[in-house]
Image (cartoon, rainbow, N blue to C red):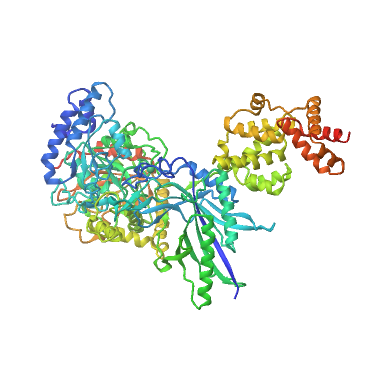
Amino acid sequence: MNYETVIGLEVHAQLTTRTKIFCGCSTEFGRTPNSQTCPVCLGLPGALPVLNRKAVEFAIRTGLATNCRIAPRSIFARKNYFYPDLPKGYQISQYELPVCEHGWLDIDLGDGQSKRIGITRAHMEEDAGKLIHGETPETAGSSLVDLNRACTPLLEIVSEPDMRSADEAIAYLKKLHQIVVYLGVCDGNLEEGSFRCDANVSVRPFGQKEFGTRAELKNINSFRFIRQAIEYEVERQIDLIESGGKVIQETRLFDSGTGMTRSMRGKEEAHDYRYFPDPDLVPLVISPAWIEEVRATLPELPDAKRHRFVEELGLPAYDAEVLAADRNLADYFDACVTLAKDAKSCANWVMGEVLRKLKETDTEVVAAPVTPELLSGLLARIADNTISGKIAKTVFEQMWLSGETADQIIQAQGLKQVTDTGAIEGLVDQVIAAHPEQVAEYLSGKDKLIGFFVGKVMQASQGKANPGMVNQLLKKKLQG
Amino acid sequence: MTIYDLTLAELRDRLDRRELSAAEVTGAYLERIAATNPQLNSFITVCAETATVEAEAADRAIAAGETAPLTGLPIAVKDIFNTAGLRTTCGSRILGNYISPYDATAIGRIKAQKAVILGKLNMDEFAMGSSNENSAFGAVRNPWELSRVPGGSSGGSAACVAARQAAAALGTDTGGSIRQPAAYCSVVGLKPTYGRVSRYGVVAYASSLDQVGPLARDVRDCALMLQAVAGYDPADSTSVDTAAPDYQAGLTGNIKGLRIGLPREYFIDGLDDDVRRAVEQATATYRDLGAEIVEVSLPHTAYAVACYYLIATAEASSNLARYDGVRYGLRAEQAENLIDMYMQSRAAGFGTEVKRRIMLGTYALSSGYYDAYYLKAQKVRTLIRQDFLDAFEKVDVLLTPVAPTPAFALGEKVNDPLQMYLSDIYTIPVNLAGTCAMSLPCGFSADSLPIGLQLIGKPFDEAAILSAAYAFEQATEWHKRQPEI
Ligand SMILES: [Zn+2]
């Protein structure tokens, strides 16, 4: 029998607010355990939560960018369960009335087709702390609790079960990832857990209307592992059904070592979280004016950017894709275009030299020593024939090292292109005189040899001669 | 007249005229506490050292002319308030050795005025109780009759003020926990409107009902204490951003034309004859003072106790989950594993009534029961609140008994929780409605036990009940009687 895969995804995006969602502690990663805590995030007796307005703004941003309806009134609820990393014995989350609902994202299926994936809801909640299980001789056998992460803001974005393959799931995740990073609401770091994904996976015979029983896959911290986990799980479920078994609703952990999923807890052991509205927090009321205020600050999103790069700047689809993939890179490119005008040459330089150098030196684009201002200065010298494209690459290397302008380097090193006909003529004459054999061959019809002569003249000029002029003069002289 | 017989207002006057120093006052009170606490057990912790230091600081402030209304005045606080550097037990074994690292907002406010904090007062464990018998630190005795309970859960606060162990106290009221003990001990107690005083740093019992309030010897002192703690606090999302008026300014004694409502559902079977007589007399006094007395109806009153014991216990079951032995408080040392540690710590740390309420609340929130219990209770709560708003269309304040009977005997209701719960039948609806009310002395029973009168005001109209209470106090002598201890 043929089976259809059904996937729904739950993404936990850690919001990059400076302070925690319900207290004023810093959210900075990697500090001394429990150094970023206070009575509120330690769950001390009598402490009360106060909602971080910035976290709400980030939730609204994300909601708007994923086409959600922003709830005018939403409610925080307590999710009750005991665990040592959960200081209050409950997690403050949203349950019945989340802040965002009814959104969608369009994903590219790779064949020019696109598909709309529904977003059921996005709700705000606080993160738990971390348990560290005795890693040193002194702590062996004991568990330590670090509450620095407790109470950091999360946005849980829940999709509809609209994906039908691991490819679609990855496309959706990458798209969502790109959006939250673009919005600046999440740093998108999968390894550090600031962008976490749980996958609900089920299979059903093709044509069947009802969904099959689903398993919830947890503990997946890279796009590659998500694919692996889904593919493994689909195969496991099909094998199970084919061999007469039944899929049970359960939570399964993905083991990146074996590439397999294993049962964590079944439905019968499922928690009764006893959700109820948190009496310590008032309903979150979001006015239409606030929504519009946030909407006005939304950046241009990747889809819109790609579209503009193709339609308005005339870039090939591939270039637009590469440049729009990262917001900072796109901003860099846009800044270059604004200054240098020629979009295609900007695209070539950014995608070529700039990206290469960033990779080589492991630098973020925002920290590139050659800024858009400096790069456009260089492009201007190519455009006005001061230097050739080839010399420009050398100049670029030096700009990267020194941070100087193209003009400074050209000036200091005398790299100005020779456009004086007399001077170039002299070099052309020398080259022709020195290579009589090649001249004879050229005259006998080997036109390609023109490249050889151009190379020799350029070499003699130390690259400074204007290649167009050299070409022209050579042709004229060789033909006598 | 001894120092500890003076009211806050009288002490203020003596301190300002340098006839007394804060150090002398504090010393007198510490002696009084030492002499009387063995009988009453109203204090869990006496803070002699810090109080002495605070008194010296207050004297310096007074000398420098930097005097706030409470500067140098001797106050005690229920052990539910977090007090930095001091033990904060909430009457529970599970927090028996817990030293809080921070001050509750209310504590911060009285400290900012340089009040002197004499100590932490006994209470029913986690404020769950109506007799103060549910304390891990032993029962408190009623200063009027040592075989009787002082009421609860702020039993230590009421007994302390009645017995002149502090000039005034702070308590909390979730279902009557200030008003009922105030009535049993013949002091003035006020539960402000929900949101009027910050709950930050007050160990939570039932978050949507808990409210901080004063217990004092007379209405003026009560107003002075309320003034000190009232007002918006950004650290409590449920505190309300409206300025508190000048409560003392409204204490004129003139209440001509005040419309007072008597809810007919409060004068029912089970109301003790002495209590009924005292409340009727009080009504007559108000009529004499020029008030208009109107009968009103609060039709959903009969459902209030049931509604309260669903909502309060549901919230409590969640609020008390943090006492798990992981970060602070009692931890069972012999546990086999994590679950075992939770179970043993909580089994050993919580008392019977707390366990009963955690179980009730857990049940009310459970999947499959939530709609029938918690959700229905919330709907009933809305109806009860509406009852009050409707009544306040017709009258300015409501007048009722505080409790159906005077103080009962120690041990009398310990094994009958339902009977115990009914002692809050007249106070609970006010918490559900979220409005303000106070208890003031209005007489004594045939066997000389205090009886309290409850005045209920419109939301955020504490000024109206204080004014009405002051007029009654001016016309009567009940508040001047003192227990012989
Ligand atoms: Zn914190």
Decide if residue B9 is on the left or right side of residue A351.
left
Q: Quadrant of the C terminus of chain B?
A: top left
Choose between B401 and B434: the one closer to the eye.
B434
**Residue A263 x %, y %:** 43, 66
From this viewpoint, is residue B478 visible?
A: no
Decide if residue A459 is on the left or right side of residue A130.
right
Decide if residue B140 is on the left or right side of residue A430.
left
Ligand 1 shown in quarter: top left
At 75% across and 35% down in the image, what residue appears?
A: A456
From this viewpoint, is residue B331 visible?
A: yes
**Residue A128 x %, y %:** 40, 51
Tag count in the figure?
0
**Residue B149 x %, y %:** 18, 51
Task: Point out the residue furthest to the bottom here.
Answer: A244
**Residue B373 x %, y %:** 39, 62
At 12% across and 39% down in the image, what residue appears?
A: B34
Choose between A22 and A217: the one closer to the eye.
A217
Q: Is residue A381 above or below residue A248?
A: above
Choose between A460 and B253: the one closer to the eye.
A460
Quadrant position of residue A438: top right
